[in-house]
Every structure is written in structure tokens, then in C-alpha cells.
Image: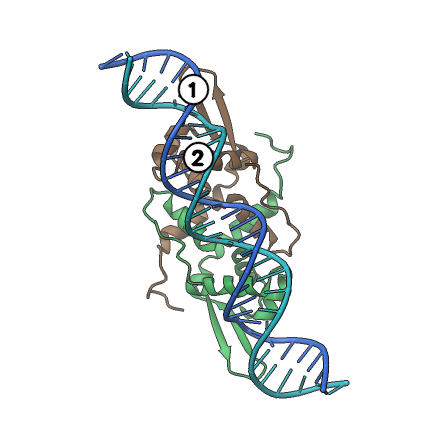
Chain colours: A green, B brown, C blue, D cyan
DNA sequence: GCCCATAGTGTCGAAAAGGATACCGTCATG
DNA sequence: CATGACGGTATCCTTTTCGACACTATGGGC
């Protein structure tokens, strides 16, 4: 926990690209952000709500990714001290600022499916 | 080499986001794409040209990332059978189609610098 | 009394990603 | 003759990442 990631932001202009990538990299962060951005009506999702939307993520990984997103200031975690524990995750302003990025990623993914197979060779 | 990456594209709608991320993930691919997109006047860069633009990438990694980008159909590799070997890398159509994504990543990185420090807490 | 849901944590181990370093062959230059 | 540029490979090793699995506490329902 509290990994170090993004340490050497000392590169040339392409750096900004890399920096952003390192922040949203991590196997599930993209999807988490996507769900928080697009699927929640009021912008909040509970832990198991996210789990249901992403069945092949283990609990540990989901916690992990959420903690990193929180550490990076993208999501805010609200704990309600209730008896069946309730925890809500919602995007911060910084998190919402990623919307164009996520949209671009999703748009590209939708358009250019999975493989470069034969269509558009060069 | 010839890693497997992107194997389980079986997820919910957020999948497209993840799929795209997995393709451009890899520590240096973002920067490579950025340089190929933005810095080359005629859209072509040679191996050592890229190396000069990214001094802290080892030869092995640069080769590696370029090979993956090639395998994923983003860049095209042209070898000129000359005596000082000459190899040019340029984007394919598929590669250029990533432009909005790279631009979004760069724009975000430029705007939201590195850290969530104190500005914009929530 | 037992199981379920909630929201996690802890430990372990495999696999992948990444870095360091050394080496290759050819030709031109000094 | 040695050195450098070119575009890589090969080998080794360390770090990081990810997944499986077990475990926690509380209270409600059956």
C-alpha cells in the first residue's frame, strides 16, 4: 500500500502523457473510473455495488485500486458508521476532470475493437 | 516477447476503457506514441532518434515497446537494407487513430500537473 | 445455532514488467 | 588499429503486480 508510482516526472514533453497514464494505470482503475463517471445516477457507488459491476475483480484488488485512486485524489470515500457497514465512493472534482480522458479511451476502444487483424493494415 | 496482454475482453461496458488502456500501457508506449504523433515532421523517426528523445529508456526497453506497438498494429517498421542500418518507425492509420486519446492524456497531464497536494481538495 | 450481507484485511506465491549490462556485425573515420 | 554510429540481442536479476484464499466483526433472518 502507498506505493510510490510516478516518481520520475523528469522527462521531455511527452512526460505529461506518461504521467497521466501512470495515474490511471492499474488493471482496474479505468473501469472503476468509468463506472463512477457513467453508471452511477447520483455519482455514488458502494463497495459491493462496484463489485457487482466488475465480477472478476477480487475484493482485495478492488480495495487496493480504490485506495490508490483515493490516494491520488480521484475518489472520495465516505464511511457511514452504521451497523451493516456502508461506504460510498464518489469522484472528486479532480476525478471528474478525467472525464474527457475516459471518454477518449472508451471511444477508441469501442471504435477500434480488439485486434488489428486485417482491416486497416497500414 | 509476444506477450499475451489483453486476453479477457469479456467485461461489462467499461471494458472498452480497459482494453484501450491495456494496449497503450507499458511505461514508455505513451511517450513513444506522443513523439511519433507530435514531434516528427514527416511522421517518421529512427531508432536512435527516439532514443535521443527519451534518454532514460534502455535500448532493450525501447526495442521491446516498439515491438509491442508494432504487434498491436500501431506503428510500422521499415528497414532499409543499407550499410549503416536504417530503420524508420512511423504510425499506421490505427496508430494515428489514437491521437485524440494521446491528446486527452497530454492535456490532462499538463493541466493537473503531478500531485493532488492541496489545490482542489474535493 | 447457522448463514448471510457488509466492507474490508493479511498472507502467500506466481508471473510479468522493467532495468543493467554485455555483446553482435558492418562500415567510415581518425 | 581502435573507435564510434547504427539497430539491435541475449542474459540475468530485481521489483511490481496480480490473483487465490482465508479471515475479521456485527447484526438480522430463518
Q: What residue is at 55 percent from the left and 58 percent from the top? A: A34
Q: Which residue is mark 1?
A: B85
**Eyeballing the image, is B120 above or below B76?**
below
Task: State which chain disc 1 sits on.
Answer: B
Label 2 Cα neighbours within 10 Å, binned few <14 / some 14-19 / many ≥20:
few
Q: Position of residue A56 (x, y in %)?
A: 63, 59
State whether discs 2 and 1 lie on one chain: yes
Left or right, B9 with reference to B96: right
**Front of the two marks 2 and 1:** 2
Residue at screen point 51% across, 70% down: A89
Residue D6: x %, y % from top left = 39, 23
Label 1 crowd bin: few (<14), some (14–19), many (20+), radius 10 Å: few
Secondary-structure class at tag 2: helix
Chain name for mark 2: B
What secondary structure is marked by label 1?
loop
Q: Which mark is residue B60?
A: 2
Viewer-proximal residue among C27 and B13: C27
> Dividing the image into 4 quarters, which one contains the C terminus of chain B?
bottom left
Image spot of residue B49 (x, y percent): 37, 30
* x then y, percent, for residue A12: 33, 42
Find the distance from the CA under tag 2 to the CA under tag 1: 17 Å
Residue B55 makes an appearance in the image = yes
The first of marks 2 and 1 along the sequence is 2
- Contact between marks 2 and 1 (CB within 8 A): the answer is no
At a point 45% along the width and 49% down the height, the residue shown is: B104
Q: Nearer the viewer, residue B58 or B51?
A: B58
Q: Seen in the image, is B57 located left or right of residue A60?
A: left
Quadrant (top left, top right, bottom left, bottom right) of the N terminus of chain B: top right
Amino acid at each position: 500500500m502507498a506505493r510510490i508510482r510516478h516518481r520520475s516526472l523528469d522527462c521531455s514533453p511527452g512526460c505529461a502523457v506518461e504521467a497521466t497514464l501512470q495515474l490511471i494505470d492499474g488493471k482496474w482503475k479505468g473501469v472503476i473510473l468509468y463506472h463512477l463517471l457513467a453508471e452511477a445516477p447520483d455519482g455514488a457507488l458502494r463497495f459491493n455495488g462496484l463489485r457487482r459491476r466488475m465480477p472478476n475483480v477480487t475484493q482485495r484488488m478492488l480495495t487496493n485500486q480504490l485506495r490508490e485512486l483515493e490516494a491520488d485524489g480521484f475518489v472520495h470515500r465516505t464511511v457511514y458508521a452504521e451497523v451493516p457497514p456502508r461506504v460510498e465512493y464518489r469522484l472528486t472534482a479532480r476525478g471528474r476532470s478525467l472525464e474527457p480522458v475516459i471518454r477518449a479511451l472508451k471511444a477508441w476502444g469501442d471504435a477500434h475493437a480488439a485486434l488489428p487483424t486485417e482491416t486497416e493494415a497500414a
